Image (cartoon, rainbow, N blue to C red):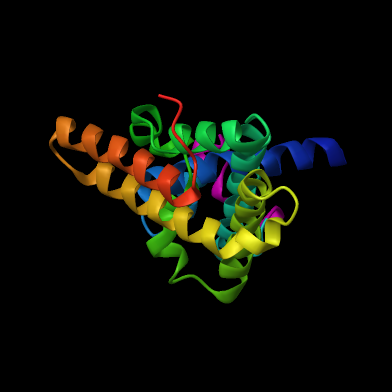
Amino acid sequence: MPRYGKEHKQATRQRIIETAGRRFKRDGIDGSGIATLMADAGLTNGAFYAHFASKDDLVATAVTDQLRAQYANIIEQAAPGIAGLEQIVRWYLSPQHRDSPDDGCPSAALLDEIGRCPDETKQAYTDGVLAVIDGIAARLAPADPPSVRTKTLSVYAMMVGTLQLSRALADQRLSDELLNEGIRNALTLLGVQASR
C-alpha cells in the first residue's frame, strides 16, 4: 500500500473539512453522519480517524474553517470604511445568500446546533465569529474598533435572524421584503446612510 506524504494528508484533511462544512450547513450537524461526510469527500469511513479524534473535533474545525472563509471572502474583500459596511450588509442579506445556505454563513445555518455543542466547538465558533465582528467593527470605528464590538455583534445577530427567517418563509415576495427591511434596519443601527 503506498504511503502518502504530509502534503497529501493535509490536502485530504482540508477536503474533508470543506465538504463537511457545506454538508453541515445544508443538512445540519445532527443530520450529517460520518459515513455521509466521508462519502462527500470521496473517502471511506475508516479514513476519518486518521484526521479527526471525533465528529465533535471535525465540527469545531469545520466551523472555524467556514468562519475563516467568510472573513476572507466577505470582510477582507469589502471596501474600507462605511462603503464596506454597506457592502457586507447587502451581501449578507441578499437573495443569493438566502438561496445558497451550503455556501453561506455558518451562523445562519448552524447557530441553534452550535449552542448545543461541546464547549470546544462553542469556543471555536466564538473565536471565529469575533474575528468577523472585529472586521466589521474596524470599518464602523477605525480609530477604536473595540468600542463598537458589542453593538456590531448585536447588529450581526439581527442579520443572522433575518436571514434565517427569510429562508423559512414560503412566500418569496415576503422573504425578499424581509431581506430589504433587514438591510435598512442593519444600516440604520450601524448609523450608515444607504447609498441606494
Residue 35's x, y, as percent?
47, 49
Nearest the eye: 76 or 102? 76
Q: Main secondary structure of the magenta part?
A: helix
Q: Residue at x 33, y 31 (%)?
A: 99
Nearest the eye: 35 or 83? 83
Q: Residue at x 68, y 33 (%)?
A: 80
Q: Residue at x 56, y 34 (%)?
A: 42
Does residue 139 lie above or below 50 as drawn?
above
Left or right of 183? Residue 18 is right
Q: In which quadrant will I find the N terminus?
A: top right
Residue reaching furthest left? 171
Is residue 190 inside the magenta stretch?
no
Residue reaching furthest top? 196
Please indicate, yes or no, whether residue 32 appears anywhere in the rendered image: no
Residue reaching furthest right? 5
Residue 133's x, y, as percent?
60, 53
Left or right of 13? Residue 42 is left
Does residue 119 lie above or below 98 as drawn?
below
Is residue 43 inside the magenta stretch?
yes
Quarter assignment of residue 29 = bottom left
Residue 181's x, y, as percent?
29, 40
Q: Residue at x 79, y 35 (%)?
A: 8
Please indicate, yes or no, whether residue 26 appears anywhere in the rendered image: yes
Does residue 11 lie above or below 185 as drawn?
above
Left or right of 139? Residue 59 is left
Residue reaching furthest bottom? 119
Nearest the eye: 11 or 114? 114
Left or right of 34? Residue 134 is right
Does residue 44 lie above or below 59 as drawn?
above
Residue extent of the magenta highlight = 39-51
Residue 148's x, y, as percent?
61, 59
